[in-house]
Image (cartoon, rainbow, N blue to C red):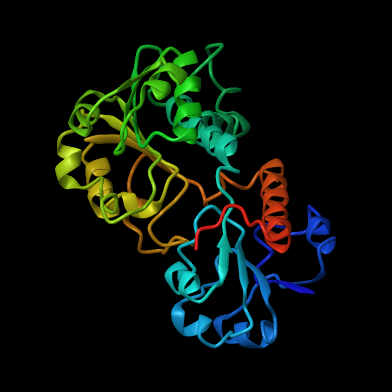
Amino acid sequence: MKIVVLDGYTENPGDISWAPFEALGELVTYDYTAPDEIFERLSGVSICLTNKTCFPKEVLEKLPDLRYIGCLSTGFNVVDVAYCKEHGITVTNIPEYATFATAQMTIALLLEICNAVGHHSDLVHQGVWSKNRDFCFWDGTLTELWGKTLGLFGFGKIASRVSRIASELGMRVLACRRSEVTDDMRKADPQVTFVDAETLWKESDILSFHCPLTADTTGLVNSETIAKMKDGVILLNTSRGPVLDEAAVAEALKRGKISALGADVVSVEPIRESNPLLSAPNTFLTPHIAWAPKETRLRLMDVAAGNLEAYLKGSPVNVVS
């Protein structure tokens, strides 16, 4: 049985092993696959793995032998799952594998904004400290998080972990969830006060986004919602780039309504040179790396192989089609 990985470089640039898949069949891996290469590479193939290679209806219609698509990600928007469901193609994803790493990145962005570690390290290496008459110096305003209010929009496992770290830092934690908040949730996370969106905008010193990208959350942070926020609010986004109206956020950063933005995601990736966030002040952008620690990718590999093994045994798991 042949297993084809269409775009394996991002998941595995060479520092981990494909052995879990090699144990399941004849494995063929490609670092990248262009749209016009899909048909040749999947000719007669029933099982493939993809990260960002797209499978719209017009592609799937030309792959009659394809029976399984394993997404090497939590998101599966690159696959027309409605078509797959109708035509008996099983699609699986990797839920929750990056919970720990994404929470870690959220806090890393916040701490960089508040403590400017990278900036001060650069100044030390440039000799600024050596020339200073005092035993210490700082450039700009440093922020203590104790007593600040963190607002979480969306509250799944990542936000839950962020809330626990924030609570240990002495922060008050608010959260807004679009679906029902159960008593079990309140018991599991007693450090969190659940509120509506209006309260979240109004009372948060820092707002962090942990929601899926839907029609309702696209452009959620816009000029109207920004106007409801505190002056000098800090925004963090490790969810999906289009949650922010980037032009509105950039404008608010320039006039100081938003004091800083930390984001691991943007609306179009890789980021375009025209993205307004690139010229906005106090903007900390990382290239979608929250999920990229080696330990996290090893977890992804194990879950993905487990998904395929379960499918081959006739009991598929993590099915989204």
Q: Is 295 above or below relative to 232?
A: below
Between 272 and 60, which is closer to the camera in this rendering?
Answer: 60
Q: Is 188 above or below relative to 35?
A: above
Between 122 and 266, which is closer to the camera in this rendering?
Answer: 266
Q: Say whether residue 248 is left or right of residue 181.
A: left
Q: Residue at x 27, y 52 (%)?
A: 245
Q: Is 100 above or below relative to 168?
A: below
Q: Residue at x 59, y 63 (%)?
A: 51
Q: Quadrant of residue 238?
A: top left
Q: Residue at x 41, y 54 (%)?
A: 266
Q: Is residue 215 visible?
A: yes
How many numbered circles does the render carry?
0
Q: Residue at x 68, y 65 (%)?
A: 8
Q: Position of residue 131 (x, y in %)?
A: 57, 23
Q: Position of residue 228 (x, y in %)?
A: 15, 34
Q: Position of residue 21 (x, y in %)?
A: 78, 61
Q: Is residue 142 visible?
A: no
Between 250 and 222, which is closer to the camera in this rendering?
Answer: 222
Q: Say whether residue 147 is left or right of residue 271.
A: left
Q: Quadrant of residue 82?
A: bottom left
Farthest-out residue, front: 314
Q: Quadrant of residue 254?
A: top left
